[in-house]
Image: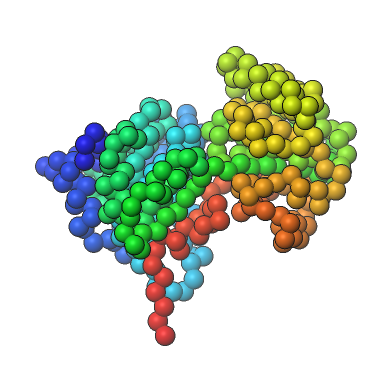
């Protein structure tokens, strides 16, 4: 394995990196939902919630909270009463824009008993380094030796042959990235029964019913909820809303975005990000399909008459909201495509949203959640059921 570095576990007895990789493919997977794995996941949760370094990183606090025993048990309990066994060895190709997102899919694979090799980006970040440090602390404990031998985190240049070599041995691949990156990995030869789970380019939106927004207290509460979905990962997560569909009354619309601007101001946004907002908004206005921004300071709230594909390609995150006005709910079908992942909603009933998504005209759209819950990961993600897709479902007649 040329140019490959093992980041965790940093100590693997006397084995060299080539032997570490080869060992993973020879070791039998663990049983699904076994006690050792569940104890390890709880220990990782404890580490992240108690670490002083992790406490300063909201993404790691959220991850630690998700990993709690009560939540993992709830997730496992939703599995149907059948036999699920590990696939074998799963290779994870992680995204560069969200430091912790790949951990959720890795944990799903880990819970189902799989051995895992996780290729992380070479770029440094406080979030990634803190996470790897906590993992290595756990891997150093004797009681977690079976976990450490079967789960390693590596890095190597994209141009190396390592992805091709690992793909040939994989029982499944979890691929995060842009469309081009996903297609490059998918083109690499695999075993005939290798499963691919691909998380490619997606975007998300929020739907706000202005008819139900009629007092300032509501405005403040709703702004806080939408900012909760936006601020982590600099709005780069696939489930962070970049588009806001505004239905009906706009009386509190400007006040709402001004409130979000206040929340962003408290984050001390960098001048470069503010300049990016200005440049992108001017590019969109030059098409004749974007109007003057409602707010352009620490965030940019930009009304648009249509959602063009290039608008989403130009979107750089960091608090840019494209606002599309709707006179009735059915109009939303004309403004979304199959790249829409999550639609968070406020001021509408769950029944109304179920009716909306059942319409044949609605493309894409894998998740519908209340505003404020867009970043809450579940094993049902991006149209996949990860616990099922990362295991063999055995039926007995």
Q: Residue furthest bottom?
A: 397
Residue 258 in view: no
Give the x, y percent position of residue 385.
50, 59
Q: Residue furthest left?
A: 14
Query: Residue at 71% across / 33% down in the picture?
Result: 322
Query: Residue at 88% across / 39% down in the picture?
Result: 249
Query: Residue at 74% across / 44% down in the picture?
Result: 335
Asked whether 48 or 120 is in front, the reply is 120
Asked whether 117 or 177 is in front, the reply is 177
Asked whether 298 or 223 is in front, the reply is 298
- What is the quadrant of the N terminus in the image? top left
Asked whether 356 or 133 is in front, the reply is 356
Give the x, y percent position of residue 165.
26, 47
Residue 275 in view: yes
Query: Residue at 44% across / 34% down in the picture?
Result: 96
Give the x, y percent position of residue 50.
41, 37
- What is the quadrant of the C terminus in the image? bottom left
């Amino acid at each position: 394995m040329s140019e490959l570095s093992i980041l965790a576990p940093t100590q693997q007895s006397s084995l060299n990196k080539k032997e570490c990789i080869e060992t993973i493919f020879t070791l039998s997977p663990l049983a699904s939902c076994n006690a050792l794995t569940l104890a390890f996941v709880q220990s990782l949760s404890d580490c992240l919630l108690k670490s002083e370094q992790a406490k300063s990183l909201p993404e790691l606090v959220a991850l630690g909270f998700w990993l709690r025993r009560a939540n993992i048990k709830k997730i496992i309990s939703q599995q149907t009463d059948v036999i699920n066994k590990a696939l074998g060895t799963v290779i994870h190709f992680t995204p560069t824009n969200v430091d912790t997102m790949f951990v959720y899919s890795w944990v799903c694979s880990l819970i189902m008993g799989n051995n895992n090799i996780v290729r992380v980006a070479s770029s440094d970040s406080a979030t990634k380094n803190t996470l790897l440090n906590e993992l290595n602390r756990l891997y150093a404990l004797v009681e977690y030796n079976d976990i450490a031998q079967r789960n390693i985190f590596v890095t190597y240049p994209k141009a190396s042959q390592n992805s091709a070599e690992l793909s040939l041995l994989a029982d499944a691949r979890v691929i995060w990235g842009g469309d081009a990156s996903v297609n490059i990995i998918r083109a690499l030869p695999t075993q005939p029964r290798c499963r691919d789970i691909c998380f490619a380019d997606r975007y998300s939106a929020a739907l706000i019913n202005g008819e139900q927004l009629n007092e300032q207290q509501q405005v403040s509460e709703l702004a806080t909820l939408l900012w909760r979905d936006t601020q982590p990962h600099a709005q780069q997560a696939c489930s962070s809303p970049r588009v806001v569909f505004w239905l009906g009354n706009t009386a509190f619309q400007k006040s709402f975005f001004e409130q979000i601007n206040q929340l962003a101001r408290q984050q001390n946004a960098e001048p470069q990000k503010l300049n990016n907002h200005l440049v992108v908004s001017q590019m969109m206005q030059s098409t004749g399909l974007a109007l003057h921004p409602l707010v352009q300071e620490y965030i940019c709230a930009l009304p648009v008459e249509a959602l063009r594909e290039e608008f989403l390609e130009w979107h750089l995150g960091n608090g840019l909201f494209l606002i599309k006005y709707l006179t009735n709910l059915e109009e939303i079908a004309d403004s979304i495509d199959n790249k829409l992942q999550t639609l968070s909603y406020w001021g509408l009933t769950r029944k109304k949203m179920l009716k909306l998504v059942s319409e044949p005209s609605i493309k894409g759209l894998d998740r519908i959640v209340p505003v404020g819950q867009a970043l809450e990961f579940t094993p049902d993600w991006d149209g996949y059921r990860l616990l099922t897709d990362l295991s063999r479902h055995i039926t007995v007649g």
